[in-house]
Image (cartoon, rainbow, N blue to C red):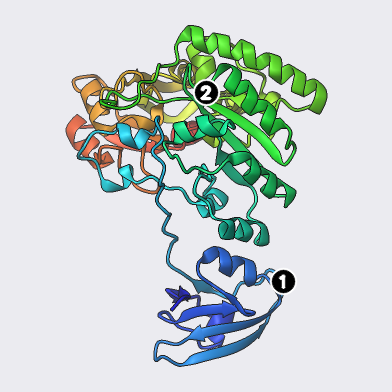
Amino acid sequence: MKGLLITSVDPDSIASELGLDSGDMLLSINGHEVNDILDYRFFSSDPELLLGVLKTDGEEWEIEVEKYEGEELGLNFPPLKPKACKNNCIFCFAHQLPRGLRKTLYFKDEDYRFSFLSGNYVTMATITDKELERIKEERLSPLYISVHATNPELRRMLTGNPKARDIIPIIKELTDAKIELHCQVVLCPDINDGEELQRTIQDLIHFYPRVASLAVVPVGLSRYREKLYPIKPVTRDYARGLIAEIKTVQDRFIKDYDDPFIFLSDEFYIKGDVDFPPYEFYGDFSQIENGVGMIPSFLYELEAIDGKLPKKAKREVNGTVITGELPSRFVKALVERVNEIKGVNIRLEVVRNEFLGPSITTTGLLTGGDIIKSLTGKELGDVLYIPNAMLKLEEDIFLDDVTLTDIENTLHVKVQKFDASPAGFAETLGLL
């Protein structure tokens, strides 16, 4: 039977007063089937509800509820399980991982619900008409779509899915329903760049402002690409050429729309050794989780906290902070600034990614093993500061299952994680 399992009921809540318990099944709200948390959130927003409930003893209840607008019922449910991706993208990073890692790292999700809830990118290659109708009915906006190319044949090649749905009709249907979309292109040199990228940009700008932004991010290539589709890496010259090409487009869009619309990931500017656009260029930073505008935001925050930092630390601070190669020169600026404070002595260690290969230079993909190998035998001071971007969400575990405790025991130093921002680092040091 369809329905949503109730895992717990908040004390002193409406649901508690109604006699609902963990183990009961919520079947329907106002005649609508309830199959996941999104159904529940949407249909329970009305002030007058008729709940269909299957009790643990098999008895079915119908319960009328009146509540204030926005008032919660107090029901809790199991976490959503993402749907697996049926694509075989030529650049998929999950295919570039070595064997022996935890199983979750090899799982590829393709679930529009997580696009809405968490900002995950989905290709919509296998989405059904029923799912599209649900998105429109329940107003699941904004959504984040991996377009890669609007040319249908090229898109099918990139996704490795000969049955992948054409993306433009889907985008039209969603934007006609006033669903806001943020799109991305994973750029593979000589494959979906050049004229194909220009076609993609022009096809998508047609739907502006419902398609609110387009991010272009470089393909990530690990050392484990044996027997996979040959893809060229992004080089310094390639990055510089792309930045110049896209700036022409951005300038035109700023003139026409007062919005650049298309954004390049920070990696292009760093690899090309080209200055970033100003902080204001990024608007509401809608693509920051995609690596777009992270460094400009970092530098802006560093400038913002500068006047708040003390001249002398409340206590002696002696330690080491680590970073990946890509953002290292910007993290260096932060370290130099805090070292101006009397009583602060922070070393910066830039860790090379030996696990996935030297072309992977972001901080978030460093492993515990890389850190141990890089820092063994070095003077680290009293504390090793590790940005939380390296760790699994809400857990102290690196990509290779090494823990913070493992680092402490191996390097014989206290380890402290911090929010990966200038303010987060300064707060951890006790300077803010």
Q: Secondary structure at mark 1?
A: loop
Q: Using residue 208 as the reference point, say whether residue 242 is left or right of it.
A: left
Q: Are marks 2 and 1 in contact (CB under 8 Å)?
A: no
Category of crowding for the residue at label 1, using alpha-carbon neighbours closer than 10 angstroms: few (below 14), some (14–19), many (at least 20): few
9 lies above or below 223: below
Nearest to N terminus: mark 2 or mark 1: 1
Residue occupying the point 81% across, 24% down: 256
Q: Using residue 159 as the reference point, say whether residue 129 is left or right of it.
A: right
Q: Secondary structure at mark 2?
A: loop
Residue situated in front as seen by the camera: 17 or 94: 94
Image location of residue 158, percent across then percent down = 46, 31
Q: Which residue is mark 1?
A: 69
**Which residue sits furthest right?**
256
Q: Using residue 162 as the reference point, say whether residue 66 is left or right of it.
A: right
Q: Which residue is mark 2?
A: 192
317 lies above or below 123: above
Residue occupying the point 42% across, 23% down: 344
Type of amino acid at the residue the image marks with label 1: Glu
Image location of residue 156, percent across then percent down = 48, 35
Residue occupying the point 29% across, 29% down: 382
